[in-house]
Amino acid sequence: MKLGAGATAGKGRNLRIHQALARQIGIAILSGEHEPGEAFGGEIEQSEALGVSRTAYREAMRILTAKGLLESRPKAGTHVTPRRRWNLLDPDMLEWMFSGTPDERFIRDLFELRGVIEPAAAELAATRHYADDLARMDEGLSGMRRHGLASAEGQAADHDFHTALLDATRNEALASLATSVAAAVQWTTRFKQRFHKQPRDPLPEHEALRDAIASRKPARARKAMEELLRLALADMPNINMEDPRS
Amino acid sequence: MKLGAGATAGKGRNLRIHQALARQIGIAILSGEHEPGEAFGGEIEQSEALGVSRTAYREAMRILTAKGLLESRPKAGTHVTPRRRWNLLDPDMLEWMFSGTPDERFIRDLFELRGVIEPAAAELAATRHYADDLARMDEGLSGMRRHGLASAEGQAADHDFHTALLDATRNEALASLATSVAAAVQWTTRFKQRFHKQPRDPLPEHEALRDAIASRKPARARKAMEELLRLALADMPNINMEDPRS
DNA sequence: AGCTCAGATATACTCATACAAAAAGATAGG
DNA sequence: CCTATCTTTTTGTATGAGTATATCTGAGCT
């Protein structure tokens, strides 16, 4: 089993062996290739099968353990932990999860989380933001205007806008959910691009939101964000927010 | 510099060297002993200074890198990453953060996050919960009744109640915030115990919340959770939710 | 003076091997 | 049948050698 060069188009660049291994095995676990509770083979066996040294293999295991995917004890061996213990909102985990075919149900969950976090964040940002927060949001907006949401630059600008908003809450706990929110945003737009040839331009709502925050109206900011999310959801016809079972 | 046996009373049990090291260094970084951007010494130098092998030291670094605290490149060395990249909501990180004297401002942030997550979660749980979710919540409640919130068992039962509620949302993204919410809950009660000799019993609100969920009334469940949080906040006189700057 | 490129160098990274510690499982004793 | 001890498997730790790569240096060119 080879890894390394261009393992996964787009993101698989220049990773050290232990990182590439962690990514590869992490993706395998997240995609359901290994059941929770399943025992991995011993270190020697596995590292040889993968064609890497025991050192590199062990360092990969440390990474996966740190993210709650594995646990290992002497004599007992290494096992996949129950899903409940996985740090699903970890940035790397999200990247791994979405590197392949993402689970539609988890995208729904993420979008729902976004629906919980962002309206509250908008409200807080409206009262607490500083000038530079607004500047960052405006920069994001102009980037979206310039490049459009079809391009990678435009999507990055969208990302920046939402991250700036979360930072403006002056709440580090909320701000560290930026990656999770960004993942939801990313897949929202990706779905839109997939289903509509001519997707609706979400810029007006973004600007309304920005203005509500700039004028320090918390209630209006929340409403603006909720409207933005409502319209975003409307563009994802295949996502059903009502039924929790797939 | 010694580590190992009983490093931090209460939690420092039976950790392997790499885990103990990661914990120790992680705590040091989180408590501000190392500025973001600061360069660590080389592996050889550091591992010798700590009296451990390079293997163990490197594995500790892998763990800390996985949590976003460090990054390292050949020739450049190992540096502390900017705070914005830290995975503050990672369970281990929370444990490390609260092992010493916790930052009061971050507790405020966590409580605010709780205030965003839990009302929404209560609303969702009311419509989506299954019988076993309710059973778990009831078990938590009876544990709180039996032991009281002054005891460790009672606090664990409280923890279980809130975790069961998050699980009842059938949303894995929300559920994986359980540890963060639990940390906030834990410090809420800890503050209460510290300031009031005879802290108010929060059981009535918990029961009202449970009943609202059991009878599948989303709006009432949200209200009940908001009331619970309002009263909890009232018992923390030193936490000021208005001023974002400490 | 500024830029491009080639080389030197420091540093993390990988590998192989040996040994230590821990914990699950087997075995003997009560 | 339960308890304690011994055995053995598996991860954990240590060490030394060698590799790869990003940064830095400086020469040569524009």
Image: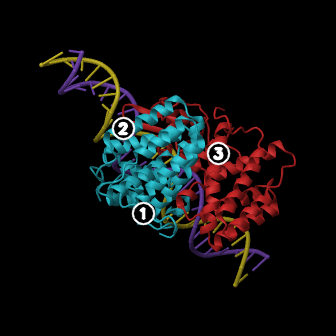
Chain colours: A red, B cyan, C yellow, D purple
**The numbered mark 2 sits on a residue in which chain?**
B
Label at residue B119: none
Q: Please determine whether, in this image, residue B210 is positioned above or below residue B68.
A: above
Point out the frontmost of discs 3 and 1.
3
Query: Which residue is identified by label 3?
Result: A112
Quarter that holds the N terminus of chain B:
bottom left
Three-letter amino acid code at the position of disc 1: Asp
Residue drawn where x is 36% and y is 50% of the image? B20
Secondary structure under the numbered disc 1 in the rendered image:
loop
Q: Position of residue A81 (x, y in %)?
A: 48, 35
Query: Which residue is identified by label 1?
Result: B103
Residue drawn where x is 36% and y is 45% of the image? B155
Q: Please determine whether, in this image, residue A53 is positioned above or below residue B10.
A: above
Q: Is residue A106 left or right of residue A172?
A: right
Q: Position of residue B208 (x, y in %)?
A: 48, 42
How far, Cα to Cα, is label 3 from label 2?
31 Å
Secondary structure under the numbered disc 2 in the rendered image:
helix
Question: Looking at the image, can residue A100 be seen?
Answer: yes
How far, Cα to Cα, is label 3 from label 1?
30 Å
Point out the frontmost of discs 3 and 2.
2
Secondary structure under the numbered disc 3 in the rendered image:
helix
Query: Which residue is identified by label 2?
Result: B143
For the residues beneath circles 3 and 1, the answer to whether they share a chain is no
Q: Please determine whether, in this image, residue A27 is positioned above or below residue A203.
A: above
